[in-house]
Amino acid sequence: MTHHKIISWLTVLCAFSGVAMTVAEDQPAPAAEQSVQEAQTAQDIEAKPWMDTALGADARAQLVLKEMTMDEKLRLVFGYFGDDLPHKGYTRHPQARPDSAGYVEGVPRLGIPALYQADGGIGVASQPSDKPREHTALPSGIATAATWNPELAFAGGAMIGSEARAAGFNVLLGGSVNLMRDPRNGRNFEYAGEDPYLAGVMVGAQIKGVQSNHVISTLKHFALNDQETGRMVVDVNIGDAAARMSDLLALQLAFEIGNPGSVMCAYNRVNGAYACESDYLLNKVLKRDWGFKGWVMSDWGAVHSTIPAANAGLDQQSGAQFDQSPYFGDALKEAVENGHVSQARFDDMVFRVLRAMFAKGVVDHPIKTSPIDFAAHAAISQADAEEAIVLLKNANKILPLGTALQKLAIIGAHADVGVLSGGGSSQVYPVGGMAVKGVGPKTWPGPMVYYPSSPMKAIQARLPNAQVRFDSGTDIASAVALAEASDFAIVFAQQWMAESIDVPNLSLPDNQDALIDAVAKANPNTIVVLQTGGPVLMPWIEQVAGVLEAWYPGSAGGEAIARILFGEVSPSGRLPATFPAAENQLPRAKIDGDPAKPFQRFTTNYHEGAAVGYKWFDLKSHKPLFPFGYGMSYTDFSYGDLAAQVSDTGQVSVSFTIKNSGVVAGKDVPQIYISAQKDLWEAPKRLVAFQKIALEPGESKTVSLTVDPRLLAVYDSKDKAWKITKGEYQVLLSRSAIEPQASIPLRLPGGVVNLQGK
Ligand code: BGC
């Protein structure tokens, strides 16, 4: 949390009175890593045996730990904020990268580098400043989730990880997978939607991508940090089993797939204890049950004690200047000397940091700043955006646009110059500067940052002879006049979301519903392109001809939107979250807590348990505006031959055929849901498998998918195991949570699998 954050809270106060594969990291370095080893002379290794890359991470960390003094150990568990905090008289640590999130001193005497930390999930972020660092931004986290394509998530992670390394960072505070329990949560755009399986797979792939650069990725926020209102004090009430089948499952899958070096504990409390001093979350779930071997860092301003926090499993205090006290400084030293924190536990804290640094290659591959190929990276971001955009409505196949258009109106959202991004610590500032200046809050989490990728310019480039005109949309009469004088109108509508602020409701702000309604009445050929943090209500849905959900589409978003509009690529995004028809369909009327009193303690009761998103809608028989998994295409897909088997070992696999029965190439996301007998699960059905598939016109493929047994089970807290009930189930091959195309019965023999689903 920055000083900007604190100041902005005041502003906010006044204004309102976010594939399993494990890496064998203990093994000696593979052949490709030998060059590092050769670079070490025999003498180096004799003097510093932990530099021997032939040894595993555990052995190396143990060796160097033995050499460290108390003060050297303390350095590794104490993080500095990477920017000034004038109101606290704090000046950034001189070694921290300017405008960065954090810095942890190394131990140069022993060859242990410092940790340079940058946010975040969509690229190398920057604290707001006169000259913020400029980087490539991926589409928002929820957008990448909407691709349902883990390969793109990996590629995006690899790209932003490489920029982090090139900019001098070896820790990226990205890998954000808080479940969308409420679409009004201000950080949903940073996360990966409402389904634990989809979210875990996508964020796990991104983490893997980041770490392919020898940059440590940080899984966050651990855990149940699902709202911004009162985030520093809210106490989340949820049972162990419900948590493990929802929020914790998303984190667990991302952890198993991505194997992050660090995990960030959250601001909120869980069942009474602060997440950063929760023995349940840190020692029991994360370290004991899941076997996490890296280190737990705190969120910035999330530490409240020395002894309870250290003993509960917190390994490192981050951005210590945000906390009331430097808890992991002298106070920790004293606690260890007095035995309140055992020497063994203290050594474990340090060991975990060291081990991750060895395991992820941070020691063997010192960061070296280098130039970045921004054009190549923009192409990676664009590929992500193109698969993220969801076609929600396409009446009479009004899209794709033809190139014979004569007069086109572009209305709203600064679409003449750029695309929107989400605010807060994950904010990436664009290469070449912001497209619009001075919009949104004057202090953090502002400003509203628009990336200079103009949808209008990209559209005009495809219509060289047409009249393409822009109206800001602020004056409805003027927008209507332009729409009336045009053959076609595209309204860009936006909803800015930002860390620290939940949205008060799901309506588009700034009178945009009225704008869309009026434009649609003036011109039947009206298309709406949404740039939102997540689901919004669409009271005008019947009036408009087409709707695209473009999320926050990242550095090359304008180009991606144009390519979809003109059919250069067929839309293949699918909703990673249910779009409600009304707010009264949600588990709670409003988000608990009072935005005007951010430090007044309160409890939120997750009475919906694990029935999150479409599961809740199913349970309550609510009809959404658009269901989870929904998305249209410019081509047609047909499905057949659905079959399911259970192997001798109980492994469920499902197969089917899919055909592109239309006339253009496209990608589809067939989804497998399994439904259980009434009341057996938290909700009637669960997503258990999916795949993104590219098909040429007329092409068909046979797809076989296996199901993680945990997705068929109910977690048993007492036995600490996942239990599958013997009996009859239904397998659904579906286009979305509510559009089954085929269904077959499945008889499960029942069984018990361990925490890891084995
Ligand atoms: C956010 C984290 C972020 C940290 C450092 C906090 O406010 O919750 O996600 O990594 O700041 O900037």
Image (spheres, rainbow, N blue to C red):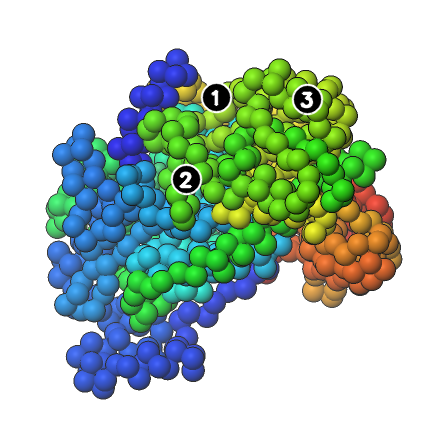
Q: Is residue 687 above or below residue 505?
A: below
Q: Quadrant of ligand 1?
A: top left
Closer to the camera in the image, 308 or 42: 42
Where's residue 221, x and y in %? 42, 42
Looking at this rendering, what residue extends furthest in the bottom direction?
42
* Rendering quarter of residue 171: bottom left
Dot 1 or dot 3, earlier in sequence? 3
For mark 3, give the secondary structure: helix
The answer for how far apart the CA atoms under marks 1 and 2 are is 35 Å
Where's residue 409, x and y in %? 65, 30
Q: Residue at x 33, y 78 (%)?
A: 36
Dot 1 or dot 2, earlier in sequence? 2
Q: Which residue is mark 3?
A: 519
Q: Quadrant of the C terminus?
A: bottom right
Q: Which residue is mark 2?
A: 434
What's under tag 3, amino acid-wise?
Val
Q: Is residue 525 above or below residue 318?
A: above
Q: Quadrant of the N terminus?
A: top left
Q: Which residue is mark 1?
A: 592
